[in-house]
Image: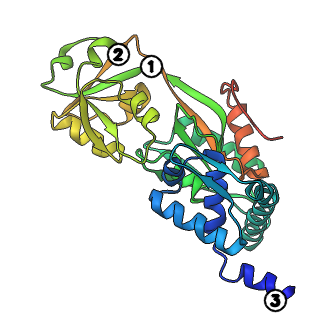
Amino acid sequence: MRRGRAAAVAGLELRELECFLVLAEELHFGRTGERLYVSQSRVSQLVSALERRVGGRLVHRTSRRVALTPLGERFLARLRPAYAGLRDAVEDARAAALGVGGRLRIGFQGTADTLLTAAVRDFGAARPQCAVDLVEIPLADPFGAVREGVVDAAVVLLPVEEPDLVLGPVFSRRPQTVAVARDHPFASRATVPAAEVAKAPLVTAAPPAPAYWRAAHAPSAVPGPAVTTLQEGLTQVAAGRAGMLLCRPTAAYHRRADVVFVPVEGLAESALGLVWHRDGESAAVSAFARALAARGVSLQDTEVVA
Protein backbone atom coordinates (compact mmCIF):
# COMPACT_ATOMS: atom_id res chain seq x y z
CA MET A 1 0.00 0.00 0.00
CA ARG A 2 2.77 2.44 0.94
CA ARG A 3 4.70 1.51 -2.20
CA GLY A 4 1.61 2.24 -4.33
CA ARG A 5 1.11 5.62 -2.73
CA ALA A 6 4.76 6.50 -3.23
CA ALA A 7 4.50 5.59 -6.92
CA ALA A 8 1.43 7.81 -7.31
CA VAL A 9 3.24 10.92 -6.07
CA ALA A 10 6.67 10.15 -7.50
CA GLY A 11 7.63 12.99 -9.84
CA LEU A 12 4.42 14.87 -9.05
CA GLU A 13 4.55 18.37 -10.54
CA LEU A 14 2.86 21.25 -8.76
CA ARG A 15 2.05 22.64 -12.20
CA GLU A 16 -0.30 19.70 -12.78
CA LEU A 17 -2.19 20.47 -9.58
CA GLU A 18 -2.28 24.20 -10.29
CA CYS A 19 -3.58 23.54 -13.79
CA PHE A 20 -6.36 21.30 -12.47
CA LEU A 21 -7.37 23.90 -9.86
CA VAL A 22 -7.61 26.67 -12.46
CA LEU A 23 -9.48 24.43 -14.91
CA ALA A 24 -11.95 23.56 -12.16
CA GLU A 25 -12.71 27.29 -11.84
CA GLU A 26 -12.78 28.16 -15.53
CA LEU A 27 -14.19 24.92 -17.01
CA HIS A 28 -12.56 26.06 -20.23
CA PHE A 29 -9.18 24.95 -21.60
CA GLY A 30 -8.53 28.19 -23.46
CA ARG A 31 -9.16 30.48 -20.48
CA THR A 32 -7.14 28.18 -18.25
CA GLY A 33 -4.22 28.47 -20.64
CA GLU A 34 -4.52 32.27 -20.64
CA ARG A 35 -4.40 32.43 -16.85
CA LEU A 36 -1.40 30.11 -16.67
CA TYR A 37 0.34 31.64 -19.72
CA VAL A 38 0.53 28.30 -21.51
CA SER A 39 -1.08 26.91 -24.64
CA GLN A 40 -4.40 25.05 -24.63
CA SER A 41 -2.58 21.88 -25.65
CA ARG A 42 -0.25 22.25 -22.66
CA VAL A 43 -3.26 22.47 -20.36
CA SER A 44 -4.56 19.23 -21.85
CA GLN A 45 -1.15 17.57 -21.38
CA LEU A 46 -0.93 18.60 -17.72
CA VAL A 47 -4.46 17.40 -16.94
CA SER A 48 -3.88 14.12 -18.76
CA ALA A 49 -0.64 13.57 -16.84
CA LEU A 50 -2.45 14.15 -13.56
CA GLU A 51 -5.24 11.75 -14.57
CA ARG A 52 -2.67 9.07 -15.34
CA ARG A 53 -1.09 9.66 -11.98
CA VAL A 54 -4.45 9.45 -10.18
CA GLY A 55 -5.60 6.49 -12.26
CA GLY A 56 -8.96 7.87 -13.36
CA ARG A 57 -10.71 10.60 -15.33
CA LEU A 58 -10.94 13.91 -13.47
CA VAL A 59 -12.42 15.97 -16.31
CA HIS A 60 -15.15 15.16 -18.80
CA ARG A 61 -14.41 16.84 -22.14
CA THR A 62 -16.72 17.39 -25.08
CA SER A 63 -16.52 19.77 -28.02
CA ARG A 64 -18.93 22.14 -26.25
CA ARG A 65 -18.27 21.92 -22.54
CA VAL A 66 -15.89 20.86 -19.80
CA ALA A 67 -17.09 19.39 -16.51
CA LEU A 68 -15.52 17.63 -13.57
CA THR A 69 -16.26 13.94 -13.14
CA PRO A 70 -17.44 12.71 -9.72
CA LEU A 71 -13.84 11.64 -9.09
CA GLY A 72 -12.71 15.12 -10.14
CA GLU A 73 -15.15 16.77 -7.73
CA ARG A 74 -13.93 14.57 -4.89
CA PHE A 75 -10.28 15.23 -5.76
CA LEU A 76 -10.93 18.99 -5.94
CA ALA A 77 -12.49 19.04 -2.46
CA ARG A 78 -9.38 17.41 -0.98
CA LEU A 79 -6.85 19.27 -3.11
CA ARG A 80 -7.92 22.87 -2.49
CA PRO A 81 -7.17 22.98 1.27
CA ALA A 82 -4.04 20.87 0.82
CA TYR A 83 -2.69 23.19 -1.87
CA ALA A 84 -3.50 26.26 0.24
CA GLY A 85 -1.70 24.64 3.18
CA LEU A 86 1.35 24.00 1.01
CA ARG A 87 1.47 27.63 -0.08
CA ASP A 88 1.13 28.77 3.53
CA ALA A 89 3.99 26.49 4.56
CA VAL A 90 6.26 27.94 1.89
CA GLU A 91 5.28 31.49 2.85
CA ASP A 92 5.89 30.83 6.55
CA ALA A 93 9.29 29.32 5.80
CA ARG A 94 10.19 32.28 3.59
CA ALA A 95 9.16 34.73 6.30
CA ALA A 96 11.17 32.81 8.90
CA ALA A 97 14.24 32.81 6.65
CA LEU A 98 13.99 36.60 6.24
CA GLY A 99 13.46 37.23 9.93
CA VAL A 100 10.53 37.69 12.29
CA GLY A 101 8.68 40.21 10.14
CA GLY A 102 9.46 38.79 6.73
CA ARG A 103 9.15 40.85 3.57
CA LEU A 104 6.16 42.33 1.76
CA ARG A 105 6.44 42.86 -2.01
CA ILE A 106 4.06 45.43 -3.52
CA GLY A 107 3.77 45.82 -7.28
CA PHE A 108 2.79 49.02 -9.08
CA GLN A 109 2.22 50.05 -12.70
CA GLY A 110 4.11 52.92 -14.28
CA THR A 111 4.23 55.37 -11.37
CA ALA A 112 3.93 54.84 -7.62
CA ASP A 113 1.02 57.02 -6.50
CA THR A 114 1.80 59.44 -3.65
CA LEU A 115 -0.88 57.78 -1.54
CA LEU A 116 0.82 54.43 -2.12
CA THR A 117 4.22 55.70 -1.00
CA ALA A 118 2.62 57.33 2.06
CA ALA A 119 0.96 54.02 2.93
CA VAL A 120 4.33 52.28 2.60
CA ARG A 121 5.79 54.72 5.13
CA ASP A 122 2.85 54.21 7.48
CA PHE A 123 3.14 50.44 7.20
CA GLY A 124 6.90 50.57 7.83
CA ALA A 125 6.42 52.71 10.94
CA ALA A 126 3.82 50.33 12.35
CA ARG A 127 5.68 47.12 11.38
CA PRO A 128 9.41 47.98 11.27
CA GLN A 129 10.30 44.30 11.37
CA CYS A 130 8.70 43.76 7.94
CA ALA A 131 10.68 44.99 4.95
CA VAL A 132 8.71 46.40 2.00
CA ASP A 133 9.82 46.09 -1.61
CA LEU A 134 8.19 48.19 -4.33
CA VAL A 135 8.32 46.38 -7.66
CA GLU A 136 7.30 47.88 -11.00
CA ILE A 137 5.10 45.54 -13.01
CA PRO A 138 4.41 45.79 -16.75
CA LEU A 139 1.54 47.94 -17.96
CA ALA A 140 0.56 45.03 -20.22
CA ASP A 141 0.45 42.43 -17.44
CA PRO A 142 -1.38 43.91 -14.44
CA PHE A 143 -2.20 40.59 -12.77
CA GLY A 144 0.60 38.21 -13.77
CA ALA A 145 3.05 39.18 -11.02
CA VAL A 146 0.44 38.46 -8.33
CA ARG A 147 -0.51 35.11 -9.85
CA GLU A 148 3.10 34.04 -10.27
CA GLY A 149 4.08 35.04 -6.73
CA VAL A 150 6.53 37.71 -7.87
CA VAL A 151 4.69 40.17 -5.60
CA ASP A 152 2.36 39.63 -2.66
CA ALA A 153 -0.08 42.34 -3.78
CA ALA A 154 -0.19 44.93 -6.53
CA VAL A 155 -1.65 48.37 -7.11
CA VAL A 156 -3.24 48.22 -10.55
CA LEU A 157 -5.49 50.30 -12.73
CA LEU A 158 -9.14 49.30 -12.55
CA PRO A 159 -11.22 47.51 -13.74
CA VAL A 160 -10.46 44.18 -12.07
CA GLU A 161 -12.70 41.24 -13.01
CA GLU A 162 -10.41 38.35 -12.07
CA PRO A 163 -12.19 35.61 -10.07
CA ASP A 164 -8.98 34.41 -8.43
CA LEU A 165 -7.99 37.85 -7.16
CA VAL A 166 -9.30 39.91 -4.25
CA LEU A 167 -9.93 43.59 -4.96
CA GLY A 168 -9.01 45.55 -1.85
CA PRO A 169 -9.01 49.32 -1.31
CA VAL A 170 -9.91 51.44 -4.33
CA PHE A 171 -8.31 54.88 -4.40
CA SER A 172 -6.92 57.76 -6.48
CA ARG A 173 -10.00 58.35 -8.60
CA ARG A 174 -8.76 60.94 -11.09
CA PRO A 175 -9.98 62.76 -14.24
CA GLN A 176 -8.38 61.54 -17.42
CA THR A 177 -6.32 63.29 -20.07
CA VAL A 178 -5.34 62.22 -23.56
CA ALA A 179 -1.64 62.46 -24.36
CA VAL A 180 -0.96 63.51 -27.96
CA ALA A 181 1.98 64.75 -30.00
CA ARG A 182 2.42 68.54 -30.24
CA ASP A 183 1.23 68.60 -33.87
CA HIS A 184 -1.88 66.49 -33.16
CA PRO A 185 -5.28 68.17 -33.85
CA PHE A 186 -6.17 67.80 -30.15
CA ALA A 187 -3.01 69.55 -28.96
CA SER A 188 -4.41 73.09 -29.31
CA ARG A 189 -7.70 72.27 -27.57
CA ALA A 190 -8.54 73.17 -23.97
CA THR A 191 -10.58 69.96 -23.63
CA VAL A 192 -11.66 67.10 -25.88
CA PRO A 193 -15.02 65.26 -25.67
CA ALA A 194 -14.83 61.51 -25.01
CA ALA A 195 -16.76 60.87 -28.24
CA GLU A 196 -13.98 62.48 -30.29
CA VAL A 197 -11.27 60.58 -28.41
CA ALA A 198 -13.11 57.34 -29.26
CA LYS A 199 -12.71 58.10 -32.97
CA ALA A 200 -8.93 58.56 -32.76
CA PRO A 201 -6.31 55.80 -32.56
CA LEU A 202 -5.23 55.15 -28.97
CA VAL A 203 -2.26 53.30 -27.54
CA THR A 204 -3.40 50.03 -26.01
CA ALA A 205 -1.75 47.53 -23.67
CA ALA A 206 -0.46 44.39 -25.32
CA PRO A 207 -1.52 40.91 -24.17
CA PRO A 208 -1.54 39.22 -21.69
CA ALA A 209 -3.59 42.11 -20.31
CA PRO A 210 -7.22 40.90 -20.48
CA ALA A 211 -9.32 42.18 -23.36
CA TYR A 212 -11.81 43.95 -21.04
CA TRP A 213 -8.94 45.75 -19.28
CA ARG A 214 -7.32 46.83 -22.55
CA ALA A 215 -10.64 48.11 -23.89
CA ALA A 216 -11.25 50.16 -20.74
CA HIS A 217 -7.95 52.00 -21.18
CA ALA A 218 -8.18 52.45 -24.93
CA PRO A 219 -11.91 52.96 -25.65
CA SER A 220 -11.47 53.64 -29.34
CA ALA A 221 -12.86 52.08 -32.50
CA VAL A 222 -9.53 52.79 -34.22
CA PRO A 223 -6.78 50.34 -33.29
CA GLY A 224 -3.54 51.89 -32.09
CA PRO A 225 -0.11 50.45 -31.30
CA ALA A 226 0.09 47.83 -28.53
CA VAL A 227 2.75 48.45 -25.88
CA THR A 228 4.05 46.70 -22.77
CA THR A 229 5.18 49.70 -20.70
CA LEU A 230 4.06 53.26 -20.04
CA GLN A 231 7.28 54.65 -21.52
CA GLU A 232 6.71 52.69 -24.72
CA GLY A 233 3.26 54.22 -24.92
CA LEU A 234 4.53 57.77 -24.48
CA THR A 235 7.16 57.14 -27.14
CA GLN A 236 4.44 56.08 -29.59
CA VAL A 237 2.51 59.24 -28.66
CA ALA A 238 5.53 61.49 -29.22
CA ALA A 239 6.07 59.84 -32.63
CA GLY A 240 2.54 60.87 -33.60
CA ARG A 241 1.23 57.33 -33.99
CA ALA A 242 -1.64 57.54 -31.48
CA GLY A 243 -2.98 59.21 -28.37
CA MET A 244 -2.88 57.64 -24.92
CA LEU A 245 -5.23 58.00 -21.97
CA LEU A 246 -3.58 58.87 -18.65
CA CYS A 247 -4.90 60.18 -15.36
CA ARG A 248 -3.93 63.77 -14.55
CA PRO A 249 -1.29 62.97 -11.86
CA THR A 250 0.46 60.50 -14.18
CA ALA A 251 0.33 63.05 -16.99
CA ALA A 252 1.84 65.71 -14.72
CA TYR A 253 4.62 63.33 -13.62
CA HIS A 254 5.54 62.39 -17.18
CA ARG A 255 5.44 65.81 -18.82
CA ARG A 256 7.77 66.16 -21.79
CA ALA A 257 8.37 68.79 -24.45
CA ASP A 258 7.05 66.73 -27.38
CA VAL A 259 3.79 65.60 -25.76
CA VAL A 260 0.67 67.58 -24.81
CA PHE A 261 -1.86 66.36 -22.22
CA VAL A 262 -5.43 67.47 -22.92
CA PRO A 263 -8.30 66.93 -20.40
CA VAL A 264 -11.08 64.61 -21.65
CA GLU A 265 -14.72 65.48 -20.98
CA GLY A 266 -17.36 62.81 -20.40
CA LEU A 267 -15.00 59.95 -19.64
CA ALA A 268 -15.17 57.96 -16.41
CA GLU A 269 -12.42 58.68 -13.92
CA SER A 270 -9.50 56.32 -13.67
CA ALA A 271 -8.91 54.54 -10.36
CA LEU A 272 -6.35 52.33 -8.68
CA GLY A 273 -6.98 49.26 -6.56
CA LEU A 274 -4.91 46.92 -4.41
CA VAL A 275 -5.26 43.28 -5.49
CA TRP A 276 -3.92 40.02 -4.14
CA HIS A 277 -4.49 36.34 -4.82
CA ARG A 278 -7.30 34.65 -2.92
CA ASP A 279 -4.85 31.96 -1.87
CA GLY A 280 -2.16 34.51 -0.94
CA GLU A 281 -3.85 36.47 1.84
CA SER A 282 -1.53 37.11 4.77
CA ALA A 283 -1.34 39.26 7.88
CA ALA A 284 1.14 41.58 6.12
CA VAL A 285 -1.09 42.03 3.05
CA SER A 286 -4.10 42.72 5.27
CA ALA A 287 -2.13 45.24 7.32
CA PHE A 288 -0.97 47.02 4.21
CA ALA A 289 -4.54 47.16 2.89
CA ARG A 290 -5.56 48.79 6.15
CA ALA A 291 -2.70 51.27 5.80
CA LEU A 292 -4.11 52.31 2.43
CA ALA A 293 -7.59 52.52 3.93
CA ALA A 294 -6.33 54.72 6.76
CA ARG A 295 -5.02 57.15 4.18
CA GLY A 296 -8.60 58.02 3.27
CA VAL A 297 -9.23 55.68 0.34
CA SER A 298 -12.67 54.50 -0.65
CA LEU A 299 -13.52 51.10 0.83
CA GLN A 300 -16.42 50.47 -1.52
CA ASP A 301 -16.30 46.95 -2.94
CA THR A 302 -13.38 46.15 -0.62
CA GLU A 303 -12.52 42.75 0.80
CA VAL A 304 -9.94 43.45 3.50
CA VAL A 305 -9.12 40.46 5.64
CA ALA A 306 -9.24 41.19 9.37
| Closer to viewer: mark 3 or mark 2 | 3
Residue hosting label 3: 3
Percent position of residue 237, x then y: 22, 35
Residue furthest toward the left? Answer: 183
Marker disc for residue 264: 2
User: Going from the N terminus, do you reach mark 3 or mark 2 first?
Assistant: 3
Out of 177 and 39, give the one closest to the viewer: 39
Position of 213 compared to 67: left or right? left
Position of 33 compared to 185: left or right? right
- Whether pointer 3 and pointer 1 mark residues with C-beta atoms closer than 8 Å, the reply is no
Above or below 213: residue 149: below
Out of 84 and 288, give the one closest to the viewer: 84
Residue hosting label 1: 175
Percent position of residue 119, x then y: 65, 40
Q: Which quarter of the picture shows residue 193?
A: top left
Q: Dot 1: within a 10 Å radius of its alpha carbon, few (fewer than 14), some, or many (20 or more) residues? A: some
Q: Please, what secondary structure does the residue beneath circle 1 have? A: loop
Residue at 60% over, 29% down? 171
Q: Which image quarter is the N terminus in?
A: bottom right
Percent position of residue 153, x then y: 62, 48
- Whether pointer 3 and pointer 2 mark residues with C-beta atoms closer than 8 Å, the reply is no
- Whether pointer 1 and pointer 2 mark residues with C-beta atoms closer than 8 Å, the reply is yes
Mark 3 belongs to which amino acid?
Answer: Arg
